Amino acid sequence: MIDNAAVVMAQGVVIAAERKEGQDDNMTSSHFHSFFELYYLEACSRQYVVDDRLYAIKPHTLVVLPPRLMHHSYGLKGAPFRRVVVCFTPEGTAPGLYERLKELQGVHELTDAADIRYVEEMLQELLSEEDSGCDELSLAVKESLLNLLIVRILRLKSRRLDPLNVGKIRKEVAYISEHYAQDLSLDDLSARFYISKFHLCHEFKKYTGNTVIEYRNFLRILHAQRLFMESDLNLTAVSEAVSFSSLTHFERVLMKTAGIRPHESRRQIMESKKSGQTVNSSLPLPKPAQEGGSDPSIVLQSCQVKRPGRQS
C-alpha cells in the first residue's frame, strides 16, 4: 500500500487527508513519520501494529498516532477494507490541541452513535476540501475542520483497545526496541527467548514486516533524527550515539531507508528550527504488497500556502 497522504506531507504541507479502499492491499513493513496521523477504519477489519503491540481493529476504530511511532496495518487475504487518514503538523492546529492529542495515543473503538456520525462527517468534509483546491481559503477551512475534529476526539466516548496477546514475539520486538543500540545477534536472541533462529526470523518478519536487522536499523535512524532535532551533536557523534560502526555505515543506512544523506537531513532540521517550521519526513514509504497494489486513481493535491505571520 502506498501512503499517499505521507507523500503529500513530505512536500511541506501542514494537513493532508486521504480515503483508500481495496483488497489485499497491505503495508509490507513498519515505518514512521515526523508528523501526527489519525487513522479511521470505515469498513471491514484489519490488523494494526504499533511498535511492539498488535491490535485487531474493526469499523469505527480510531488510531491516534503521534510522530515517530513505528506502525503498519494489514488485512486477511481477500478481505476488502476502507479507511481514512488525516496527517498534520503542529502548524495546522490551535494552540494546546496538538499536545493534548498526544495523551490519547493508542487505539480507540468509538461506541457512541453521535460521536461516530460527527467524526465521519468531519472526515468527509476534510476529504472534500482536499479536492477543492490549494488556495489560502481552502487551507483555512481544513485547519478549522481539523481543530473541530480534534476537540471532538478529546471528548469522545470510546473504549481504548488492549493489544492482542501474541506470545513471545511481542517481547522480542520490545526487547529489540529497548536495546536497539546493542549488536544483538540471532544467536543472542534465540538463546534469550528459547526459540530457534528460523522460527524467530519467520515470526519477526510476519509480525513487523521487517527482518531483525532492518527493524533495528529503522530504530537507530529514528533515534538519530531525534538527536538531530534535540541536540547539537555533530554527525560523527550522532552516528556513535546510535551505535553505527562508522559514519559511512550511518550514511549508507540513512540513504537506503530515507533517501537522504546525514548532512542533508541535519541541514534541513537546523533550517526548520531557525524558521519555526516542522520538517516532514517519512521512513520509509512502504512498497505495495503486490503488483498493482497502489491505486493510481487516488490523486492528492499539494497545498503550500504561505501566510503572513505563520509558516506552512
Image (tube, helix red, strand yellow):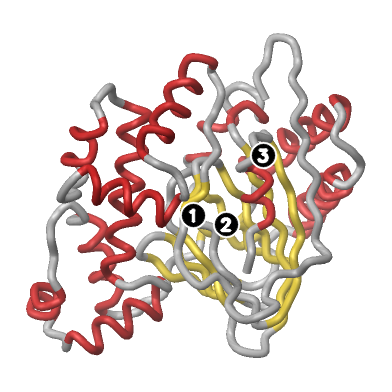
Element class at badge 1: strand
Crowdedness of circle 2 by 10 Å Cα count: few (<14), some, many (20+)? many
Q: Indicate the amino acid at tag 2.
A: Val
Near-viewer residue (288 or 95):
288
Q: Residue at x 87, y 42 (%)?
A: 129
Element class at badge 3: helix
Crowdedness of circle 3 by 10 Å Cα count: few (<14), some, many (20+)? many
Marks 3 and 1 sit apart, C-alpha to C-alpha, by 14 Å
Examine the image and state in which quarter residue 140 appears: top right
Confirm whether residue 104 shows in the render.
no
Dot label at residue 63 = 2
In the rendered image, residue 77, in percent from the top left (x then y), is placed at 61, 89
Does 89 appear above or below 260?
Answer: above
Relative side of 285 to 148, left or right: left
Residue that label 1 marks? 106
Relative side of 121 to 237, left or right: right
Residue that label 3 marks? 150
Q: Indicate the amino acid at tag 3.
A: Ile
Marks 1 and 2 sit apart, C-alpha to C-alpha, by 6 Å
Q: Residue at x 48, y 48 (%)?
A: 105
Is the C terminus in the top left, top right, bottom left or bottom right quadrant? top right
Near-viewer residue (235 or 174):
235
Examine the image and state in which quarter residue 42 appears: bottom right
Q: Indicate the amino acid at tag 1.
A: Gly
In the rendered image, residue 176, in percent from the top left (x then y), is placed at 22, 62
* First in residue order: circle 1 vs circle 2: 2
Confirm whether residue 250 shows in the render.
yes
Residue that sits furthest to the right in the current view = 132
